[in-house]
Image (spheres, helix red, strand yellow):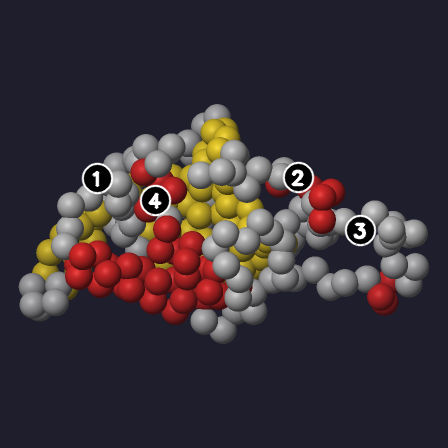
């Protein structure tokens, strides 16, 4: 990956819920600002751009690393379609914020994944769905990704395609999309060992 990858130290957080959270005022990165601008901001408060709140959803989605996963091509395609469909269904009805945005993905699973390649690869399908929802390419430099993960020992009962009930880990994925702010930094991808302090 040509973009830099940074690892942040561990922090603790609480559980997440669906809803909206206030967003910090939007300030484009320094390399995207116009050098010819004569004023810092609009002279009239009514002319100031409206800052959209963050879109936050949590869905019971099981994601796993694809690096060492052995599965048939049709099985993988079906799994990817299911993950993309689940994310798009969870975001249905929400208006995407304008770019640039900060995307925070927090994965809950039975085991932790390798933060260097396992966690980013497990987020591939959700990120494709988010790029489709944001109407941009997943390689767009205005997307700032923040990945984290946690573990659970809770289980749930699910019904497979043959109607049989089986037990699996109560995995979930928390998605937060909000306007980018200077406090987010300029790294395109940040992988945290745990969620940021004070956040679910």
Q: Mark 1 or mark 4, which is nearer the start of the sequence?
A: 1
Report whether residue 89 is seen: yes
Q: Is residue 109 above or below residue 133?
A: above
**Real-space Cα separation, disc 4 to disc 3, in angstroms:** 35 Å
Q: Nearer the viewer, mark 1 or mark 2?
A: 1
The residue to which callout 2 is attached is 183
Residue at left 28%, top 63%? Answer: 82
Residue 160 location, x and y as percent?
Answer: 13, 63
Dot 1 or dot 2, earlier in sequence: 1
Q: Is residue 64 left or right of residue 193?
A: left
Residue with the mark numbered 4: 121
Image coordinates of residue 167 in percent, x first then y, are: 14, 52
- Residue at 62 percent of width and 58 percent of height: 99
Q: Quadrant of the N terminus?
A: top left
Tell me which label, 2 or 3, sits earlier in the chain.
3
Please name the residue that numbered disc 1 is placed on.
68
In percent of width and height, residue 114 lies at: 32, 33
**Relative depth, front residue between 11 and 15:** 11
Contact between labelled residues 1 and 4, with CB atoms less than 8 Å apart: no
The extreme front residue here reads 2
In this orientation, which residue lies closer to the viewer: 95 or 3?
3
Percent position of residue 86, x then y: 34, 64
Residue drawn at x 46%, y 65% is: 132
Residue under numbered circle 3: 34
Q: Dot 2, how many residues are within 10 Å of its Cα: few (below 14), some (14-19), or many (20+)?
A: few
- SS for tag 3? loop
Could you tell which of marks 1 and 3 lies nearer the N-terminus?
3
């Amino acid at each position: 990956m040509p973009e830099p990858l940074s690892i942040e130290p561990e922090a603790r957080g609480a559980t997440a819920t669906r809803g909206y959270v206030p967003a910090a005022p939007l300030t484009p990165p320094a390399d995207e600002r116009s050098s010819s601008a004569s004023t810092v901001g609009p002279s009239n408060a009514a002319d100031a751009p409206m800052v959209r709140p963050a879109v936050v959803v949590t869905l019971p989605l099981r994601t796993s690393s694809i690096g060492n996963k052995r599965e048939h091509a049709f099985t993988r395609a079906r799994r990817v379609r299911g993950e993309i469909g689940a994310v798009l269904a969870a975001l249905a009805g929400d208006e995407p914020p304008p770019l640039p945005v900060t995307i925070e993905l927090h994965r809950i699973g039975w085991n932790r994944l390798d933060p260097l390649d396992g966690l980013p690869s497990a987020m591939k399908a959700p990120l494709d769905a988010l790029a489709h929802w944001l109407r941009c390419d997943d390689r767009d430099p205005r997307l700032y990704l923040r990945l984290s993960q946690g573990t659970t020992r809770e289980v749930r009962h699910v019904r497979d395609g043959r109607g049989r009930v089986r037990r699996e880990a109560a995995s979930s994925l928390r998605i937060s999309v909000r306007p980018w702010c200077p406090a987010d930094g300029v790294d395109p991808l940040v992988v945290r060992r745990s969620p940021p302090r004070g956040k679910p």
